[in-house]
Amino acid sequence: MRVLIAGCGYVGCALAERLLAAGHRVIALRRSDAGAPPGAEPLRADLADPASLAGVPHGLDAVCYLASADGRDDRAYARAYRDGVAALLTRLAEHPHRPRFLFASSTAVYGQRDGEWVDEDSATDPLDFRGRRLLEGEERVAASGLPATVVRFAGIYGPGRRRLLDRVARGEAPIDPEGPRYTNRIHRDDCAGLLAHLLEGVDGGRASAPSRLLAVDDDPADEETVLTWLATQLRAPDPPRRKSGDATVPRANRRCRNARLRATGYPLRYPTFRDGYAAMLRDSP
């Protein structure tokens, strides 16, 4: 299988390593020349610049769109999730071959704030521009005519991403006093494992991949539960409580179901935050 990873970064490199180990060919598209996994074919391009995509080869079996915004503003999100997707799909449409297309979206497309359960068919009403731009990307993928799966990832954590651990250790990760406020996440290794599973054939090739899939673990945990558990593991002080009314923007509060993910046959390596963070703590120097 010949796979293009468009945006070969944190998750993309882990996916590339899995695919290469399984004997597949991988083309790693990045904005810079640095960082392509050993064994992958590097391709330097800017997804939001159609002219730079001339080097994207035809005859691909699959494309994984794993780009991330290079800034925190609306313009950066529009470039990554609207313009970049449109440009790459235009390039792919120049050839009659129809590769499988996996698009990394996010649970930011949901707007629920009262702890509701959501799944792939729940209403999407984003709280801010991030979710709106992601939905625009999803719409372009759906309209492309390619066999495609939109994968809505929850918060991604894993090796090298210690920001929350460090904040808890310093006593700088406050608990919402108006909780419970539910949080959803998935470990980097399960992101890569799930994508490889979708590419190589759901349920051993006996079933087709769904058009939309929530990529979350088994435990949409209350923020207080997560922070308190981490503080105990780190032997840090109890997390402080945020003052009521401190939040300046609406905060997400929803519980994401992963029944459809489980139905694909993919076995989560880290089914709860405890499993994933415990591994990170064991591997810390």
Image (cartoon, helix red, strand yellow):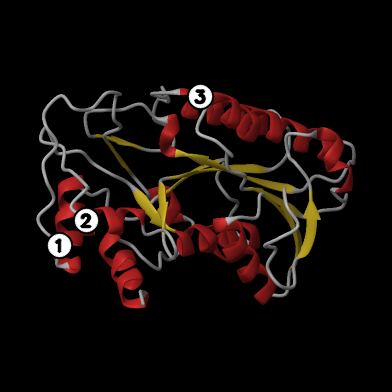
Using the rendered view, name the quadrant where residue 113 is placed: top left
- Eye-nearest disc, 1 or 3: 1
**What is the CA distance from the residue labelled 3 to the residue labelled 2?**
34 Å
Looking at the picture, which amino acid does disc 1 mark? Ala
**Mark 1 or mark 3, earlier in chain:** 3
Residues at marks 2 and 1 touching, judged by CB atoms closer than 8 Å: yes
Task: Provide the secondary structure element on which disc 3 rests.
Answer: helix
The C terminus - image quarter: bottom left
**What is the CA distance from the residue labelled 2 to the residue labelled 1?**
7 Å
In front here: 263 or 55?
55
Looking at the picture, which amino acid does disc 3 mark? Arg
Residue 170, numbered label: 2
**Mark 2 or mark 1, earlier in chain:** 2
Residues at marks 3 and 2 touching, judged by CB atoms closer than 8 Å: no
Residues at marks 1 and 3 touching, judged by CB atoms closer than 8 Å: no
x, y percent for residue 22? 67, 74
x, y percent for residue 237? 11, 58
**Who's the residue at 41% across and 62% down the image?**
158
Q: Is residue 166 visible?
A: yes
